[in-house]
Image (tube, helix red, strand yellow):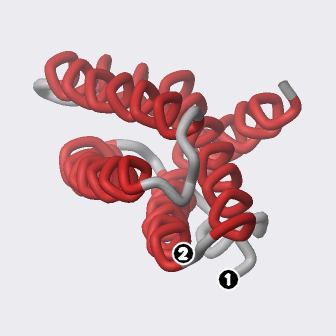
Protein backbone atom coordinates (compact mmCIF):
# COMPACT_ATOMS: atom_id res chain seq x y z
CA UNK A 1 0.00 0.00 0.00
CA UNK A 2 1.21 3.48 -0.79
CA UNK A 3 0.35 5.42 2.37
CA UNK A 4 1.29 8.78 0.92
CA UNK A 5 -1.27 8.53 -1.86
CA UNK A 6 -4.26 10.81 -1.59
CA UNK A 7 -7.67 9.23 -1.73
CA UNK A 8 -9.36 10.76 -4.77
CA UNK A 9 -12.17 8.31 -5.43
CA UNK A 10 -14.93 10.83 -4.79
CA UNK A 11 -15.50 14.41 -5.74
CA UNK A 12 -17.25 15.30 -2.48
CA UNK A 13 -16.00 15.67 1.07
CA UNK A 14 -17.88 12.62 2.37
CA UNK A 15 -16.35 10.17 -0.08
CA UNK A 16 -12.95 11.76 0.41
CA UNK A 17 -13.01 11.48 4.21
CA UNK A 18 -14.48 7.97 4.17
CA UNK A 19 -11.64 7.03 1.81
CA UNK A 20 -9.17 8.38 4.34
CA UNK A 21 -10.86 6.36 7.09
CA UNK A 22 -10.33 3.26 4.94
CA UNK A 23 -6.69 4.24 4.38
CA UNK A 24 -6.16 4.77 8.13
CA UNK A 25 -7.69 1.34 8.87
CA UNK A 26 -5.25 -0.27 6.42
CA UNK A 27 -2.29 1.61 7.87
CA UNK A 28 -3.12 0.37 11.37
CA UNK A 29 -3.01 -3.18 10.00
CA UNK A 30 0.35 -2.45 8.36
CA UNK A 31 1.82 -0.98 11.56
CA UNK A 32 0.74 -4.02 13.55
CA UNK A 33 2.14 -6.44 10.96
CA UNK A 34 5.46 -4.61 10.48
CA UNK A 35 8.58 -4.61 12.64
CA UNK A 36 11.59 -2.41 13.27
CA UNK A 37 12.27 0.63 11.11
CA UNK A 38 9.44 -0.31 8.72
CA UNK A 39 6.96 -0.24 11.60
CA UNK A 40 8.34 3.09 12.77
CA UNK A 41 8.04 4.63 9.27
CA UNK A 42 4.46 3.42 8.75
CA UNK A 43 3.50 4.58 12.26
CA UNK A 44 4.83 8.07 11.55
CA UNK A 45 2.97 8.13 8.20
CA UNK A 46 -0.20 7.07 10.03
CA UNK A 47 0.36 9.73 12.68
CA UNK A 48 0.77 12.44 10.01
CA UNK A 49 -2.33 11.36 8.09
CA UNK A 50 -4.45 11.20 11.23
CA UNK A 51 -3.26 14.62 12.34
CA UNK A 52 -4.04 16.29 9.01
CA UNK A 53 -7.36 14.44 8.72
CA UNK A 54 -8.54 15.44 12.20
CA UNK A 55 -7.43 19.04 11.72
CA UNK A 56 -9.47 19.26 8.52
CA UNK A 57 -12.53 17.73 10.17
CA UNK A 58 -12.23 20.15 13.10
CA UNK A 59 -12.01 23.18 10.79
CA UNK A 60 -14.45 22.20 8.03
CA UNK A 61 -16.78 19.30 8.81
CA UNK A 62 -17.51 19.56 12.54
CA UNK A 63 -18.54 23.25 12.44
CA UNK A 64 -20.98 22.52 9.62
CA UNK A 65 -22.40 19.46 11.39
CA UNK A 66 -22.68 21.38 14.64
CA UNK A 67 -24.78 24.11 13.05
CA UNK A 68 -27.04 22.24 10.65
CA UNK A 69 -27.65 18.73 12.00
CA UNK A 70 -30.24 17.94 14.61
CA UNK A 71 -28.25 16.95 17.68
CA UNK A 72 -25.15 18.33 15.97
CA UNK A 73 -23.59 20.04 19.00
CA UNK A 74 -23.72 16.84 21.09
CA UNK A 75 -22.44 14.67 18.24
CA UNK A 76 -19.56 17.02 17.50
CA UNK A 77 -18.66 17.22 21.19
CA UNK A 78 -18.53 13.41 21.38
CA UNK A 79 -16.34 13.16 18.26
CA UNK A 80 -14.00 15.90 19.52
CA UNK A 81 -13.58 14.10 22.85
CA UNK A 82 -12.66 10.91 20.98
CA UNK A 83 -10.21 12.81 18.78
CA UNK A 84 -8.56 14.38 21.83
CA UNK A 85 -8.03 10.94 23.36
CA UNK A 86 -6.59 9.63 20.10
CA UNK A 87 -4.14 12.54 19.95
CA UNK A 88 -2.99 11.83 23.52
CA UNK A 89 -2.49 8.15 22.71
CA UNK A 90 -0.59 8.96 19.51
CA UNK A 91 1.72 11.27 21.49
CA UNK A 92 2.30 8.53 24.09
CA UNK A 93 2.99 5.96 21.36
CA UNK A 94 5.49 8.30 19.73
CA UNK A 95 7.64 8.13 22.87
CA UNK A 96 7.71 4.32 22.96
CA UNK A 97 10.02 1.85 21.27
CA UNK A 98 7.95 0.43 18.38
CA UNK A 99 9.20 -3.05 19.29
CA UNK A 100 8.07 -2.84 22.92
CA UNK A 101 5.12 -4.85 24.27
CA UNK A 102 3.62 -1.56 25.53
CA UNK A 103 3.61 -0.15 21.96
CA UNK A 104 1.96 -3.32 20.72
CA UNK A 105 -0.80 -3.07 23.32
CA UNK A 106 -1.38 0.66 22.89
CA UNK A 107 -1.44 0.59 19.08
CA UNK A 108 -4.11 -2.12 19.17
CA UNK A 109 -6.15 -0.13 21.71
CA UNK A 110 -5.84 2.98 19.55
CA UNK A 111 -6.82 1.01 16.46
CA UNK A 112 -10.01 -0.17 18.16
CA UNK A 113 -10.87 3.33 19.41
CA UNK A 114 -10.16 5.02 16.07
CA UNK A 115 -12.20 2.49 14.09
CA UNK A 116 -15.16 2.94 16.48
CA UNK A 117 -14.75 6.72 16.18
CA UNK A 118 -14.73 6.56 12.37
CA UNK A 119 -17.86 4.38 12.34
CA UNK A 120 -19.72 6.83 14.61
CA UNK A 121 -18.50 9.82 12.64
CA UNK A 122 -19.61 8.31 9.34
CA UNK A 123 -23.05 7.38 10.67
CA UNK A 124 -23.78 10.44 12.81
CA UNK A 125 -22.10 13.19 10.79
CA UNK A 126 -21.03 12.19 7.30
CA UNK A 127 -24.11 10.26 6.20
CA UNK A 128 -26.42 12.94 7.60
CA UNK A 129 -24.46 15.76 5.95
CA UNK A 130 -24.58 13.90 2.66
CA UNK A 131 -28.38 13.86 2.62
CA UNK A 132 -28.71 17.39 4.04
CA UNK A 133 -26.27 19.44 1.97
CA UNK A 134 -26.35 20.18 -1.74
CA UNK A 135 -23.79 18.30 -3.87
CA UNK A 136 -22.07 21.58 -4.77
CA UNK A 137 -21.58 22.40 -1.08
CA UNK A 138 -20.10 18.93 -0.45
CA UNK A 139 -17.68 19.45 -3.34
CA UNK A 140 -16.67 22.87 -1.97
CA UNK A 141 -16.11 21.32 1.46
CA UNK A 142 -13.77 18.76 -0.10
CA UNK A 143 -11.67 21.58 -1.54
CA UNK A 144 -11.60 23.22 1.89
CA UNK A 145 -10.58 19.94 3.57
CA UNK A 146 -7.78 19.38 1.06
CA UNK A 147 -6.50 22.93 1.60
CA UNK A 148 -6.49 22.50 5.39
CA UNK A 149 -4.72 19.14 5.10
CA UNK A 150 -2.10 20.61 2.77
CA UNK A 151 -1.36 23.37 5.28
CA UNK A 152 -1.35 20.88 8.18
CA UNK A 153 1.24 18.66 6.50
CA UNK A 154 3.55 21.63 5.88
CA UNK A 155 3.68 22.62 9.56
Q: Which residue is mark 1?
A: 1
Image coordinates of residue 99 in percent, x first then y, are 53, 60
Looking at the picture, does residue 152 appear above or below residue 4?
Answer: above
In space, the residues marked 2 and 1 are separated at their CA atoms by 9 Å
Question: Mark 1 falls on what kind of element?
Answer: loop
| Residue 29 in sight here | yes
Looking at the picture, tell me which residue is in the foreground, 72 or 46.
Answer: 46
Q: For the point 25% across and 48% down, which residue is it?
A: 113
Question: Is disc 2 in contact with disc 1, using a CB cutoff of under 8 Å?
Answer: yes
Looking at the picture, tell me which residue is in the foreground, 35 or 4.
Answer: 35
Q: State which tag comes first along the sequence, 2 or 1.
A: 1
Question: Mark 2 falls on what kind of element?
Answer: helix
- Furthest toward the right, the residue is 154
Looking at the picture, does residue 25 appear above or below residue 98?
Answer: below
- Furthest toward the bottom, the residue is 1
Image coordinates of residue 4 in percent, x first then y, are 77, 64
The circle on residue 30 is 2
Image coordinates of residue 88 in percent, x first then y, are 42, 25
Amino acid sequence: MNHGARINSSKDVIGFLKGQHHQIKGMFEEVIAATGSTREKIFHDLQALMSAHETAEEKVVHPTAKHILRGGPAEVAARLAEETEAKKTLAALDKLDVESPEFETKIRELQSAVLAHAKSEEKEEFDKLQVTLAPAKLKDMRKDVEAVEARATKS
